[in-house]
Structure formats: C-alpha cells, structure tokens
Image (spheres, rainbow, N blue to C red):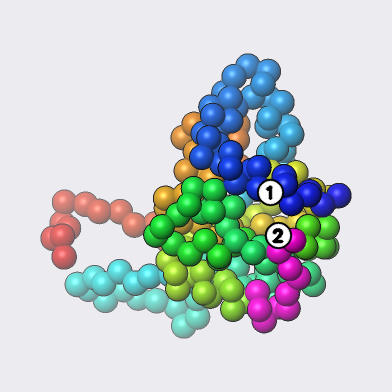
C-alpha cells in the first residue's frame, strides 16, 4: 500500500539523522531486526561513472565492450514498468546545493505502480532512459539492484518486483552511512565487476 505524502515529508525531515539508524544496525538484537526489516534479500551494485583515463601507452582492447552505464540502460529497456520520483529524497532531505535535487530515483517493475502518485509518476521507457542520461551528465553515480528499504518506505511490494536505480551524489547519498552499518548489511552492496587497476614502482605519475 502506497505511503501517504506526510510520510515522505517526515522522512525528508529526519534524513540528516539517518546516521543514527545506521549505527543502530551494530547493536545486538536491534541490528538483526533492522537487517531483516529493511535489508533482507538486498543485492546492490555501484555503477562507476563513464570516464577515460589517459595513459602514456597503448592498451589493447576488444572490438566491442559493455560500459557500466549500458547495464543500467539494459534493465530500463527490459522493464515493462518505469517510475520516476519527483525528487531525490537524499538531496532534498539534506538540502543539497551541489547537485540537482529534482533528479530522483528510477524504479522498475510492477510494484512501482503502488508508489504514491504525489511523489512520482509512471513514465515511458524513453523518458526513463533520458532521465538516466541526464543524471550521468550531472555527475551522479548509479546504484542499481534490489533494495528492501525502498519497498518498505514506499509501501510498494512485493520487493522482488521492484528494482531500484538510485542516482547518487557524493555529499548526500544515504549510503555514505556505509561505514556505520553492520558488516552483514555492508556485504550486500558491492562494486560492479570490471577492470581493476594496480600501480607499481614504474608509475611516472603521468
């Protein structure tokens, strides 16, 4: 059942204190309850920004490759239901001054139809793709996956029919509280597999 508008406003007002709840996940019993209530079954990936690192040597490559943002676009293209939030609850809650507050999350899946229409709207596949592109151009980083926390605060379920695409900034993102969370929860958030870079003593600092 969709949450009422006042609930959304309450979360925004309380958002700056989200670190307190993050710390509570380390408490005995309370932490286990919070994990079950808000994070059970989570599987989230951080999608790195598309960028080029210039080297002073040629790096052999493949004829085709899948860059990180294409993964996000793939899921948008595969989904039958697309929902855009009117704003980002994290940036609005913290009154962000560096990144656009109006670039909110994208939700995919049938459960998104249960979200309160006062805080977002259903859009076409093309609109969702354009929104994701606008977020990347604004310097935001995608976080994609299943996130029970969203299903709970939005009142949209079942969670298995809701996929989250967060568009995160470095200053306000809820997941900046990651170091405060219990290890059981932090293990559910990982980097997308890809290229790894190592630097040895031969690096010239170019």
Q: In the rendering, which numbered label is found on residue 8?
A: 1
Q: Position of residue 151 (x, y in %)?
A: 75, 48
126 falls in the magenta region: yes
The answer to whether residue 194 is visible is: no
**Image vertical order of residue 57 relative to residue 205, above or below:** below
Which residue is at a point 52% across and 74% down the rendered structure image?
A: 134
Q: In the rendering, which numbered label is found on residue 182?
A: none
What residue is pinned by disc 2?
119
Q: Position of residue 57 (x, y in %)?
A: 22, 73
- Placement of the C terminus among the 4 image quadrants: bottom left
Q: Residue furthest top?
A: 28
- Is 202 on the left or on the right of 145, as rendered? left
**Image vertical order of residue 111 relative to residue 6, above or below:** below
Element type at mark 1:
helix
- Is 50 on the left or on the right of 13, as rendered? left
**Image vertical order of residue 150 relative to residue 186, above or below:** below
Element type at mark 2:
loop
Q: How packed is label 2: few (under 14 Cα within 10 Å), some, or many (20 or more)?
A: some
Q: Are marks 1 and 2 in contact (CB under 8 Å)?
A: yes
Q: Position of residue 169 (x, y in %)?
A: 46, 56
Front residue of 9/135: it is: 9
Rendering quarter of residue 127: bottom right
Which residue is at a point 26% across and 76% down the rendered structure image?
A: 58
- Report the magenta residues as a range: 118-128
């Amino acid at each position: 059942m969709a949450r009422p508008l006042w609930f959304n406003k309450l979360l925004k007002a309380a958002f700056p204190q989200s670190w307190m709840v993050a710390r509570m996940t380390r408490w005995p019993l309370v932490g286990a309850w919070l994990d079950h209530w808000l994070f059970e079954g989570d599987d989230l990936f951080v999608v790195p920004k598309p960028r080029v690192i210039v080297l002073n040597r040629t790096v052999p490559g493949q004829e085709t490759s899948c860059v990180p943002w294409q993964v996000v676009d793939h899921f948008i293209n595969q989904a039958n239901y697309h929902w855009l939030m009117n704003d980002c609850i994290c940036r609005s809650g913290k009154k962000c001054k560096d990144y656009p507050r109006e670039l909110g999350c994208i939700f995919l899946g049938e459960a998104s139809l249960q979200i309160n229409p006062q805080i977002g709207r259903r859009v076409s596949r093309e609109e969702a793709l354009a929104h994701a592109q606008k977020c990347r151009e604004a310097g935001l980083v995608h976080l994609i996956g299943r996130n029970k926390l969203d299903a709970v605060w939005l009142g949209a379920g079942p969670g298995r029919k809701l996929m989250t695409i967060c568009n995160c900034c470095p200053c306000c993102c809820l997941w900046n509280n990651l170091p405060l969370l219990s290890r059981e929860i932090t293990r559910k958030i990982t980097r997308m597999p890809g290229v790894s870079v190592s630097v040895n003593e031969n690096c010239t600092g170019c």
